[in-house]
Image: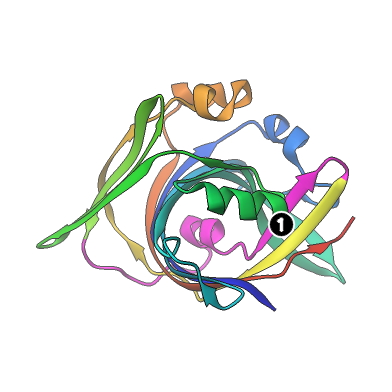
Amino acid sequence: MNFLQAEWRKLAIINYEIDSHILLPYLPKGTELDFYKDKCYVSLVGFMFLNTRLLDFPIPFHRNFEEVNLRFYVKKKENGVWKRGVVFIKEIVPKPALSLVANSIYKENYHTMPMKNQIHESGDELLIRYSWKDKSWYSIQIMAENTAKPMEENSEFEFITEHYFGFTKKENTTSEYEVCHPKWDCYTIKEYHLEIDFQRIYGNDFKCLNHQKPISVMLAEGSEIQVKTKKYIT
């Protein structure tokens, strides 16, 4: 059953390599960390939610909005098959009703903050900017070529975007939900700029990211998505 239907568009993805031991306290029971070429990744992701429907009903004044999240990558073996998914450290949205629904039903760590976006096309360039305010304004900005192209198989982009489950830890309980979408096209990055304080927004465990350069920067076109009803697995 579809709990939520929407479009996720213009996903700005800032990837960092991180010491895997930092993530172990956040790891849901029954899952393990997923690595790409022996590297443990954490990603800062900003994107647009568009045409959002909850249980197939549009919610007035909550259809189109920004989200910024920090996430890492996990996998879980079920009947001999790996399920690849993500775990969210924190998700930021601009409306309190969104946080209330996500936190109460999916037990995610949503927070409400003022947000704004800028998406501007100029000839062969595409500018994407997502901003949020926690006393000070923070932002992700990407300038890319304005032509999307298919992802390459076995690429870093494929690893980052082809995780189709969300796993949530609540004390000793793990819940799982499936996210359905086609493969995403990607844009070639020309330049990027970040204004962020990881320690302030995400806590002391992630202050190390303030002193690191991203391992990669990506921009995905996105698509229509469906979030299935969650289930408990432990």
Q: Nearer the viewer, residue 135 or 24?
A: 135
Check the picture and name the quadrant holding the C terminus.
bottom right
> Which amino acid lies under the numbered mark 1 shown in the image of this protein?
Ile
Which residue bears the numbered disc 1? 105
Which residue is pictured at 55% across the width and 58% down the height?
159
Q: Is residue 127 magenta?
A: no
Residue 23 place in picture, x, y as percent: 69, 35
Residue 81 to residue 121: above or below: below
Q: Is residue 228 left or right of residue 90?
A: right
Residue 36 visible in the snapshot: no
Where in the figure is residue 227, as x and y percent of width and height? 62, 69
Q: Is residue 195 above or below residue 50?
A: above
The N terminus - image quarter:
bottom right
Q: Position of residue 198 (x, y in %)?
A: 50, 27
- Res 229 seen here: yes
In the image shown, does 124 or 195 lie closer to the viewer? 195
Residue extending furthest toward the front: 60
Relative image position of residue 111 (x, y in whole percent)? 55, 40
Q: Secondary structure at mark 1?
A: helix
171 part of magenta stretch: yes
Q: How is the image coloured?
A: rainbow
Magenta range: 146-172
Quadrant hosting residue 55: bottom right
Q: Residues within 10 Å of mark 1 (few under 14, many from 20)?
A: few
Write the residue at 85% across / 70% down.
80
Q: Residue at x 53, y 64 (%)?
A: 154
Give the mark count.
Answer: 1
